[in-house]
Amino acid sequence: MGNVKAIPQGMHTVTPCLTINGCAEAIEFYKKAFGAEEVMRAPDPTGKLIWHAAIRIGDSTIFLNDEVPGMSRPATPASLWLYVEGVDAAFKRATNAGCQVVMPVTDMFWGDRFGKVTDKWGNDWGIASHVKDMTPEEMKEAEKAFIASMPKKK
């Protein structure tokens, strides 16, 4: 065990963890909506709740668990950002699976094509493809133009 890595193979320094009421259902939903692959699951002794599970979307792992009194925090919605190849197709897949549109896919001033959906557990999923490299100056000018195009509040 002398060569054990502090960060396991395939993991990143930061790993989001979602506490969800209905974790097993969420795993199946994320497979349909985002192409998630189930890596592992550890059910509680009753088999009704999941103490710990892991899914992989692209090259990233997300941990999930059910809300378990005395063992976890209450389920709280989170916000996640997915970079994908083909944002329009990924967005359509998510909405076809049942995600609700928060923001349609749009070319954004920072160089991403981006949209946002919400799942039935209240988690927001930003879905983006980077489509344009921009200098900080170009991004600032694009931001100014974006702000100027916004409807004025009365």
Image: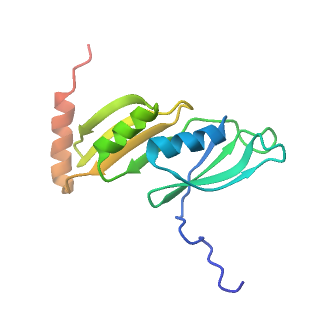
Is 102 left, or right, of 88 in this rendering?
A: right
Quarter of the image where one finds residue 148: top left
Farthest-out residue, top: 154
Image quadrant occupied by the C terminus: top left
Q: Going 61% across and 35% down the picture, which residue do you hit? A: 76
* Residue at figure coordinates x 70%, y 86% from the top left: 2
Location of residue 22 by image quarter = top right
Q: How is the image coloured?
A: rainbow
Say which residue appears at 40% left-offset and 41% top-offset.
126
Q: Quadrant of the N terminus?
A: bottom right
Tell me where residue 75 appears, x and y as whole percent: 65, 36
Q: Nearer the viewer, residue 152 or 75?
A: 75
In the image, farthest residue toward the right: 45
Give the image location of residue 142, x and y in percent. 17, 43
How far across and how far down the image is residue 117, in percent? 41, 34
| 23 lies above or below 13 | above
Q: Is residue 96 left or right of residue 149?
A: right
Residue ID at (79%, 38%): 69
Total marks in image: 0
Residue 89 shown left or right of residue 74 in the figure = left
In the shown orientation, is residue 142 left or right of residue 56?
left
